[in-house]
Amino acid sequence: MQLICRALGRTDYQATLHAMQAFTQARTSETPDELWLTEHDSVYTLGLNRKNVRLPQNSLPLVLVDRGGKITYHGIGQVVIYLLIDLKRRGIGVRQLVSMMENSIIQLLSDNGIKAYADKDAPGVYVAGAKIASLGLRLKNQCCYHGLSLNVDMDLSPFSAIDPCGYKGLQVTQTRDLGVQQTPVQLGQSLLKLLEDQLNESNSLT
């Protein structure tokens, strides 16, 4: 089953969101799945679970989005990968895809000497209690979009203006602060390959 991987470079968040929505709206049963690797300028995104969210009191843009979850932050130095996947055609569910995303990140970090783990009650990937990667998906006609973000080499201070993913006091971390010298581009390409392998492996089992 064809899977197209695209390295988009730095993109505007809202333009990329609209592109994902348009892609999903227009896709047919023959449309290949795609993975989009990108990086965004500073922006907060607020998901559909907006109850009791602490909003940032600063000048950075805030965008309302149609993914699950609450609020998070994107910025330069963070790896973002969007997954535009026909789940029905691949014979997988959302929970399986989330596990693939988490496992790919955990493997990438392990390859760089970092012990990370997932939390079944709070999707994402963590290192010693601090969140290093966030996940969020939207499902439409059994096809998904949105994806994951991995903190690599960025200014983490904007996270302090929110409760990341709705968790008060949740600390965040990044690979640079954990001793990894690889750039966002390098880690992004490695993570893209791990995700591609996970999806292709799952396809071979169906």
Image: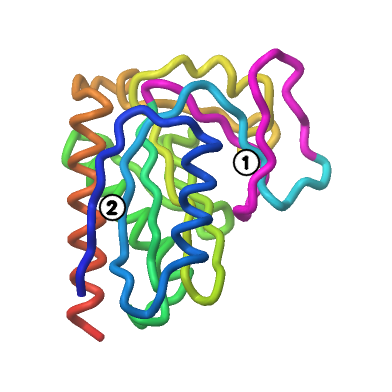
Determine whether 198 is above or below 20 in the image: below
Is residue 169 in view? yes
Residue in the picture at 55% in, 37% down: 14
Residue in the picture at 82% in, 47% down: 51
Magenta span: chief secondary structure? loop
Query: Mark 1 and 2 residues: CB-CB less than 8 Å, in contact?
Result: no
Amino acid residing under circle 2: Ser
Marks 1 and 2, how far apart at CA? 20 Å
Q: Which mark is residue 104?
A: 2
User: Where residue 92 sits in the image (x, y, percent)?
Assistant: 38, 77
In this view, the residue in front, 30 or 119, is 30
Q: Which mark is residue 9?
A: none
User: Where residue 196 sits in the image (x, y, percent)?
Assistant: 21, 58
Q: Which mark is residue 165?
A: 1
How dense is the environment of label 2, judged by Cα within 10 Å: few (below 14), some, or many (20 and up)?
many
Residue farthest toward the front in the current orientation of the protein: 26
Whether 194 is among the magenta residues is no
Instruction: Point out the stretch of residues depicted in magenta.
Output: 53-77
Whether 60 is among the magenta residues is yes
**Can you tell which quarter of the image residue 96 is in?**
bottom left
